[in-house]
Image (tube, grey):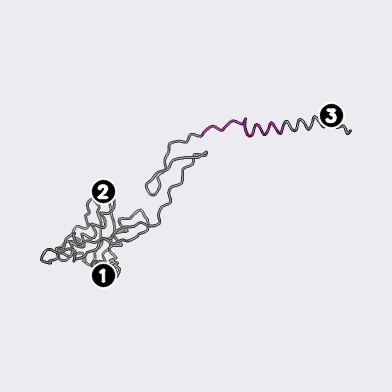
Amino acid sequence: MKRYSPYLVVGVSIAVILVASAFVWTNFARPNPEPVACTMEAKLCPDGSAVGRTGPACEFAPCPSPAASVPIKLYYYNQNLDKDAEGNIQCSRSGLVPVSRVIPRTITPIQDAVRLLLRGEISSEEKAQGASTEFPLAGVSLTAASLDNGVLTLTFNDPQNRTGGGSCRVGILWFQIEATAKQFPGVQSVRFMPEELFQP
């Protein structure tokens, strides 16, 4: 019978013990890492939401992916909805009709919506349903907008005095811009600058 060297037997035994010990330490005896306590900081995301720190490295969680576009309403005018019992046009807000549009998501949605309204783009289908507008007005453009305590001030350029005219006409133009602007949160009233614009 072949006999093994005692040194070989001892060496193999030690190796087995070391391997077994490493296995036990790795899977059972190693202490769990202490949980990481992240600070309570918050990062403001472009859409207005906030994210906190998370994970082992306490990194800020990713912001929600912003939508590429935003649905809005533009307000045009339908005189068939704005008549009294005798069929007279009243030139009131009752004739305003919303049409759906989509604009790119930016930090200036009010200005973007008003500028789109000023372009006066109406589809054939919308015209067939009675929607109309006198926009675009030659040379008329929105140059600035500011919101303070619910009052939205819109500044226009009108080098050819196209925003004037009869009270019915300028009233409807005013109502269209006002309704388009007031769909946005925080806008309670609208004023135009210079003040002589959109006056009969």
Which numbered disc covers residue 103?
Answer: none
Cα separation between marks 1 and 2: 39 Å
Rendering quarter of residue 139:
bottom left
Task: Give residue 138's position: percent from left, percent from top.
Answer: 26, 68
* Residue that sits furthest to the front in the current view: 1
Mark 3–mark 1 CB contact (< 8 Å): no
* Magenta span of residues: 18-35
Magenta residue check for 24: yes
Q: Residue at x 23, y 50 (%)?
A: 188
Rendering quarter of residue 163:
bottom left
Cα separation between marks 3 and 1: 104 Å
Count of numbered badges drawn on the protein:
3
Which numbered disc covers residue 6?
Answer: 3
Amino acid type, callout 3: Pro
Nearest the eye: 61 or 144? 61
Amino acid type, callout 2: Asp
Q: Is residue 21 above or below residue 130?
A: above
Label 2 packing within 10 angstroms: few (<14), some (14-19), many (20+): few
Q: Is residue 28 left or right of residue 106?
A: right
Cα separation between marks 2 and 3: 93 Å
Q: Which residue is mark 2?
A: 148
Q: Which residue is mark 1?
A: 128
Q: Residue at x 12, y 66 (%)?
A: 88
Name the N-terminal-most of marks 2 and 3.
3
Label 1: which secondary element:
helix
Label 3: which secondary element:
helix
Amino acid type, callout 1: Ala
Nearest the eye: 69 or 20? 20
Q: Choose mark 1 or mark 2, whichever is in front.
A: 1
Label 3 packing within 10 angstroms: few (<14), some (14-19), many (20+): few
